Image (cartoon, grey):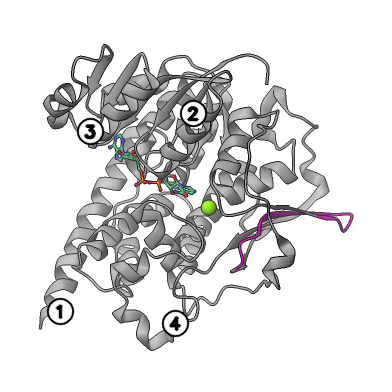
Amino acid sequence: MGTMKTITVMGATGSIGQSTLALVRQFPESFSIHALVAGSDAEGLAALTAEFRPKIIGLGDATKLDHLHEALDGIEVDIVGGEVACSKIAAMPVDIVVAGIVGIAGLPSVLAAVQAGQTIALANKEALVSAGGLVMAEAERCGAHILPVDSEHNAVFQCWQGWKGHGGRQVAQADTAALSHICLTASGGPFLETPLDHLANMTPQQAVRHPNWAMGQKISVDSATMMNKGLEVIEAYWLFDLRPDQIEVLIHPQQAVHGMVYFRDGSVVAQLAGPDMRTPISYALAWPDRLHWASARLDLAAMDQLTFASVDTRRFPGFALARQALCDGGAAPAILNAANEVAVAAFLQEKIGFTQIPAIIETVLGQSITLPIDHLDAVMAIDADARRVAAEAVTKNRRYLSL
Ligand code: NAD
Ligand code: MG
């Protein structure tokens, strides 16, 4: 690769952040770290600061700043604390902002980066689920580029070079008319074969044990409920400007194929790769080039067979709720996302059972306030109200559980 790119990593201590930094570590001549941001892991952020020597670092949880100063042990770096300050970091001009914060907590910084006209390697799907219309409209207005990092969307991006999000710098000209539909694959998660009447008893430990990927806790539970794929359908809707019925999902447990584009001439172009997030991240970091790193070779002959099946919504009711929220539009996806975050956190804390996650989301979808999503404050108000209703639903369910 030619020139050195400067990078800001939002969510540096997480799974996406670590995979990004593993690539930066391998290519010191291609990338330099401008800024690192984390939520509350002061020690983790201090260790990364010592290694990558960013100019500025941010910690979302300002109450841990003393901790951070102590852990930095005299390393010279500008430090900010709190959500607003972290969003300001995302707006500082760099070549690429990696959006790797988990949940709606990532939305303010994604929007700040978009409004600053940055190029964003987007992993934080919840930002698009909750405020996709706003984020994409602002991206167009401010000349920001959003490069998808989520593996399925990155696959579609690779198969269909030239989708409109590339703006003036696309590899090929966008030709949406040539495209019939896209397919996102899903592993089916750890409970794909579990008898339906056992699902209610599945524990957080079982839910986060994903068969193919090592990821953060929240996305691992989302994969077990398949809400992750529901969120990804909404993410794809905004990224690629398609109709909901043009976004197909197939269960593909071997996870070799990540995404496919069906063209109207009968051709289907698929992207295949091993289950390593460094592949889509490196594509976004180096785009429009490719990084040459020693990724493990995908051994198709050793895989025996590749299978594809449609989604059973009795097993994965959360997936159906997400599709419905997309069709309902308006505030529904933001409410769905907030309710899911609260329900997943409650499940991880063993306050509710596994099958109560979609049940709570359904309750919240019918009871929360809706507002037009034209401003960050409106999204945050919808999110806050949905969280309040979801927390009440968790308390009720908890009482029911202990009877
Ligand atoms: P994770 O839990 O491992 O990491 C989350 C990161 O966000 C941490 O660095 C944490 O400190 C930071 N963070 C949390 N709250 C914050 C706040 N309020 N302010 C600042 N930083 C905050 O999560 P992950 O698995 O890396 O996922 C990150 C995002 O990427 C999610 O949206 C997820 O859906 C998406 N994603 C992840 C993977 C994967 O393989 N892990 C794959 C595709 C998409
Ligand atoms: Mg994905």
> At numbered mark 1, what does the secondary structure look like: helix, strand or loop?
helix
Label disc, if present, on residue 400 of the rendered structure = 1
For label 3, the residue is 43
Separation of residues labelled 1 and 2 (CA atoms): 50 Å
Q: Are marks 1 and 2 in contact (CB under 8 Å)?
A: no
Mark 4, residue position: 194
Name the residue at 63% across, 40% down: 294
Disc number placed over residue 106 in the picture, else none: none
- Give the residues in magenta: 254-268
| Crowding at mark 4 (Cα within 10 Å: few <14, some 14-19, many 20+) | few
Dot placed on the residue nearer the N-terminal end, 4 or 2:
2
Cα separation, mark 4 vs mark 1, equals 25 Å
Q: Residue at x 45, y 49 (%)?
A: 330
**Three-letter amino acid code at disc 4?**
Thr
Q: For mark 4, give the secondary structure.
A: loop
Q: Earlier in the sequence, mark 3 or mark 1?
A: 3
What is the spatial separation of the Cα atoms under label 4 and label 3, in whole angstroms? 39 Å
Q: Is mark 1 within 8 Å of ligand 1?
A: no
Which residue is depicted at the point 69% across and 67% down? 302
Q: Are marks 4 and 2 in contact (CB under 8 Å)?
A: no
- The amino acid type, in three-letter code, at marker 2 is Arg
Amino acid residing under circle 1: Tyr
Where is residue 89, by image quadrant?
A: top left
- Of the two numbered discs 4 and 3 in the rendering, the one whose residue sits closer to the viewer: 3
